[in-house]
Image (cartoon, rainbow, N blue to C red):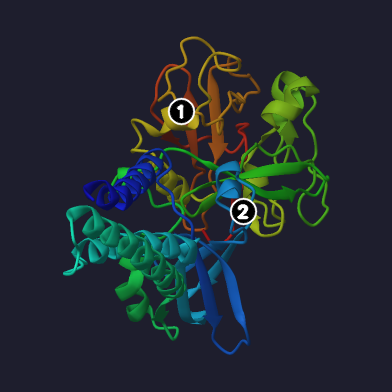
Amino acid sequence: MKTLLLVPAFILSNFLMIRAQQDQHSPKKLYKVWISVQGEPGKIKGALFETRDSSILISGSLQKSDYFKGNYDIEKLNVKDIDAISILRKNASGRGALIGTLSGVGLGILLGLATSNPNAVNGQENAGTKVGASIVFSIFFGATGAVFGAVFGTIRNKMYIHGNQQQFENKMGKLNVRSLTYDPLMAGQRLTTFSHLRETVTDADGNVYHTVALGSMVYMAENLKVTHFRNGKKIPMAKDTASWRKADRAAFCNYKNDSVGVAVYGRLYNGYVVADTSGICPAGWHVPSIDEWTSLVMCLGGKDNAGGYLKESGTLHWGNPNNTMFTENTFALPSGSRDRKGAFMVNGRICQWWAAKENNTEGFQGVLLTNETTAITMTKPDKNAGLSVRCIRDGQ
């Protein structure tokens, strides 16, 4: 009799242990969301990706395998447009049915064990009665538990927002722990790994760039190599040192005036390019401001560590020694730079990006990584310096 009782307990405990092990190695869980937009019919369906101060991001895919492969697109919804959010754990009905079945079987065995035949002549007949009753009760309550578990598993947690920021903030805790970017093993700690997205973006020349996300920030995965502004205006190429020095308007060059490395490292641009209102990034994208670069740095553990998380590990591209935090990120490669006199920095040692030219600032700003340290440095390059450009998606 004890063996019968131990069977469902053993199955349930093993199920919970396996789930715990899966959660330990793959803590991100997939939650379906249905979002009602104010004034719009129907609902937007997806998986909850990220919650922000005044918006949420959802991905179109409901397959967990797509998330780990980066095969999904992201859509942003502002709080002022959200009427209500309904949320449900993926496969909740199946999980509920399984738990209900196991619980029902366990209850059936207990009831069967409690059954006795007062007219039994010997213990063997009474034991047979209990076994038979346990089987009958287990089937009945197991089936009933499966039905109720499946039904309760489909109940959605509905949160009314009505476009109200305060109501959204009251629900933010529940949303945070259900987002794809939430990691219970890293709760309260920094993010360190970029997610590779399915989304690509094309520049004015037709070059295609992959995209990556760190939390809710979406960046191009490669440096720009475009030779035209967004509106089609051509960016002149400085073909030699003399023309680079004399440039008093937007200009670009290839590292060491050689096009061989453009596909891997992108091109170098002077400050006039990022200050030009024509826009060097594709529509929907822009050169990150120094505040946006700072946000990225803070997510990666601050200025002393962020460079180590951004750089590709090893010495395939970076010079030796290449001090990193030993991640799988390939966000930063040593694209080099050029000073205002036209001299190129040593290959494999430096990656330097422009920050957007702010209207209320006198000079230009940028960020610098080197092979010898995990730090990232905020710089003030000359407008005639040559730096790489990396774009961030609008609305970040």
Q: Please name the residue shown 63% across and 56% down the image.
A: 73
Secondary element under disc 1, as helix, strand or loop, is: loop
Tell me residue 55's x, y (percent): 46, 69
In x, y percent, where is residue 41?
Answer: 63, 87
346 and 64: which is toward the camera: 64
Which residue is denoted by mark 1 in the rendering? Answer: 327
**Which label lies toward us, 2 or 1?**
1
Mark 2 and mark 1 residues within 8 Å of each other at the beta carbon: no
Q: Amino acid at mark 1?
A: Thr
- Work out whether 244 lies above or below 97: above
| Residue appearing at x 33%, y 48% in the figure | 16
Q: Residue at x 18, y 61 (%)?
A: 121
**Residue 257 sits in which quadrant?**
top right
Q: Which numbered dot is residue 51?
A: none
What kind of residue is marked 2? His
Q: Is residue 144 left or right of residue 74?
A: left
Earlier residue among tags 2 and 1: 2
Q: Is residue 195 visible?
A: yes
Q: Which mark is residue 286?
A: 2
Residue 25 image point, x, y percent: 40, 38
